[in-house]
Amino acid sequence: HSNGHSNGHSNGHSNGCSGCGYDDQSTWQAAQGRLPHIHAEQLVDQENAQDFFCYLCHGILYLPMLTRCSHLFCSPCFQSWVMERVNEHQTGPTSKSSMQAMPCPICGSGLKKADVMPLHRAQHPAVGIMQRKWHSIKLKCLHHVDFTDPLYPFAEGAAHVKAESGIECQWVGDLPEYAGHCKICPVANALRGAHAAPPPISNGNGYHEESGGSSPFDEDDICVAKYDFDGGQNPKLLRLSANDMVKVYRTVPSGWAGGILLDKTMEEVGLPGWFPMKYVELYKDGENIA
């Protein structure tokens, strides 16, 4: 949804659109940290959730917006749709006239800014029931262990992480709690660690991944952490701070290594765990310790 929204802001506020009230950019700030698309298979009770799918993205509602004509949309989806319509108006043949209302994406009813509001702010008696139903929608995490089967291609990453390191997610909860879970999901953290590129290395001593997926480390190699790695609340991941010393036990082709922290006397401390190989480099007798 970001393209429509950004285009609307870059092109859509130079001409008059005050009639419908959608010219206030601060009113339609893009929602940060949008949830991953929620697939129907994630819903514990699909029948109970059928009224809460967004017409625009066909996913479960995220930050629901309610219109005067009783239609629901994700807030970011509706924002993007509005900005696209504004842009069309201001680059079309009627650009010199003020846009008096925004047509509802479903029924076409004219909507002004006051006719659209977050579901939790709506005052209609029936809204309370809708809010309770939306809050009670139960779903499984996108990376739930139940989806690590070839039947669910959207969870291919979770299947790979489980096969390589045994890390899995078993979260089931209410929809409003999902955003918080996504920040600490052990599989999501593992995938971010494996695939996210570390920040640029200023001293030129960084390890460059070799072709063919070969590991730069051998068993019992001593390494030093280049960056912090937060494993979240997963006990199978090894939390690293920059300059920590770690002994490698084994490596896997997906870019992960298993190992254990070392103290200043090179004695093993704590419990072993998994960490991304990109976050460490071979220890060079103190040369690469900051």
Image (tube, rainbow, N blue to C red):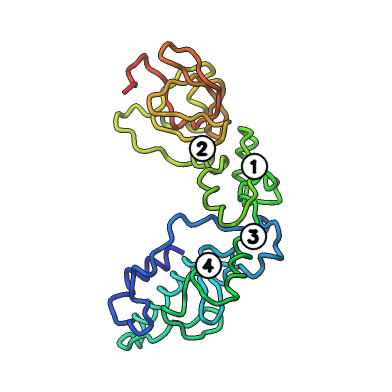
Tell me residue 92's x, y (percent).
Answer: 36, 83
Horizontal side of 100 relative to 61 (left or right) equals left
Q: In terms of depth relative to the viewer, which is nearer, 242 or 120?
A: 120
Name the residue carrying label 2: 232
Tell me the element at label 1.
helix
For the view shown, which residue lies furthest in the left direction? 14
Q: Nearer the viewer, mark 1 or mark 4?
A: 4
- Residue at the (55%, 22%) spot, across then down: 271
Q: CA distance from mark 1 to mark 3?
A: 25 Å
Name the residue carrying label 4: 64
For the view shown, which residue lies furthest in the top direction? 265
Q: Label 1: how many residues lie within 10 Å, few (<14), some (14-19) or many (20+)?
A: many
Q: Nearer the viewer, mark 1 or mark 3?
A: 3
- Residue at the (52%, 56%) spot, across then down: 35
Tell me the element at label 4.
strand
Q: Is residue 147 above or below residue 56?
A: above
The kind of residue tagged 3 is Ile
Tell me the element at label 3.
loop
Q: Label 4: how many residues lie within 10 Å, few (<14), some (14-19) or many (20+)?
A: many
Name the residue carrying label 3: 137
Q: Are marks 3 and 4 in contact (CB under 8 Å)?
A: no
Q: Are marks 1 and 4 in contact (CB under 8 Å)?
A: no
Q: In terms of depth relative to the viewer, which is nearer, 228 or 8?
A: 228
Determine the image quadrant of residue 94.
Answer: bottom left
Q: Earlier in the sequence, mark 1 or mark 2?
A: 1
